[in-house]
Image (spheres, helix red, strand yellow):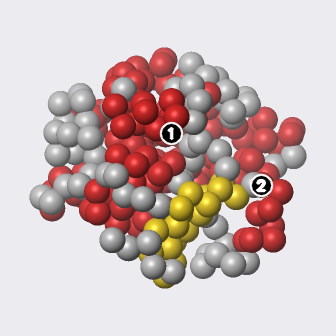
Amino acid sequence: MANMKLTYFDFHGGRGEPVRLALTMGGVPFEDDRVAMADWPERKGGTPFGALPVLEVDGKPLSQSNSINRYVAKLTGLYPSDFWQAALCDEAMDAVEDLTNEIVPTMFMPDDEKKVRREELAEGPIPLYLKRLNQNLAVQGGRYFADDRLTIADLKVAMLIRQLRSGILDHIPTDLPDRVAPELVEHFQRVMKDPAIAAYYAKRGVEI
């Protein structure tokens, strides 16, 4: 088996967490290189596109979170083999990525500008994306986003819901997912009860 090293920020969540979870669920050993925010400016230039996550496979780097997600999911059986189901999986992941691209820039804004922008997001793009994801989940039966089973798409959507409900994003109400897309919250709770995921967080003392 190839030697794997995942480099991502030192927190539970975000773009790198679905990869950590997928590798753990698949029983694939990997080096979990967690970058402290204070060290990021120094390490940024060493990444392919100045961003994380980066997955190294036998020393060869792979960047772009959904490219990494697909690779790891195929490796661990968390990606559909059927082309249409794979496309549904990609659709959910890309939707989360679109919304993440709206949220991330606010993390580097001055406080007053951040407040205005996040309130705008909470009134428009976030509810829109949550409602559409909620609809897609319902069309697929209400349990999973593709293939009638847990896939990498479910991990990525679950991490979005976890982030929004955590309180880490000030000026975005923590009950927003519960109000506009309750089925996504139920989905998040279902995913977090997966035995491998529950064991992963329990081992690290992380409350989910």
- Residue 130 is left or right of residue 162, and the answer is left
Q: Amino acid at mark 1?
A: Leu
Which residue does the image show at 78% across and 41% down from the upper left? Answer: 114
Q: Amino acid at mark 2?
A: Met
Q: Quadrant of residue 121?
A: top right
Residue identifier under label 2: 37
Asked which secondary structure carries label 1, the reply is: helix
Which circle marks residue 5 in the picture?
Answer: none
In depth, the one of 49 and 134 nearer the eye is: 49
Q: Position of residue 66 (x, y in %)?
A: 43, 61
Q: Quadrant of residue 191?
A: top left
Which of pointers 1 and 2 lies earlier in the amino acid sequence?
Answer: 2
Could you classify mark 2 by the number of other residues whose Cα lies within 10 Å: few (under 14), some (14-19), or many (20 or more)? few
Whether residue 113 is situated above or below residue 97 in the rendered picture: above
Residue 70 visible within the image: no
Q: Position of residue 34 (x, y in %)?
A: 65, 56
Q: Nearer the viewer, mark 1 or mark 2?
A: 2
Which residue does the image show at 43% across and 33% down from the upper left? Answer: 199
Residue identifier under label 1: 160
In depth, the one of 134 and 49 nearer the eye is: 49
Asked which secondary structure carries label 2, the reply is: helix
Q: Position of residue 95 (x, y in %)?
A: 42, 50
- Residue 153 is left or right of residue 113, and the answer is left
Which residue does the image show at 17% across and 45% down from the upper left? Answer: 147
In what quadrant of the picture does the N terminus appear?
bottom left
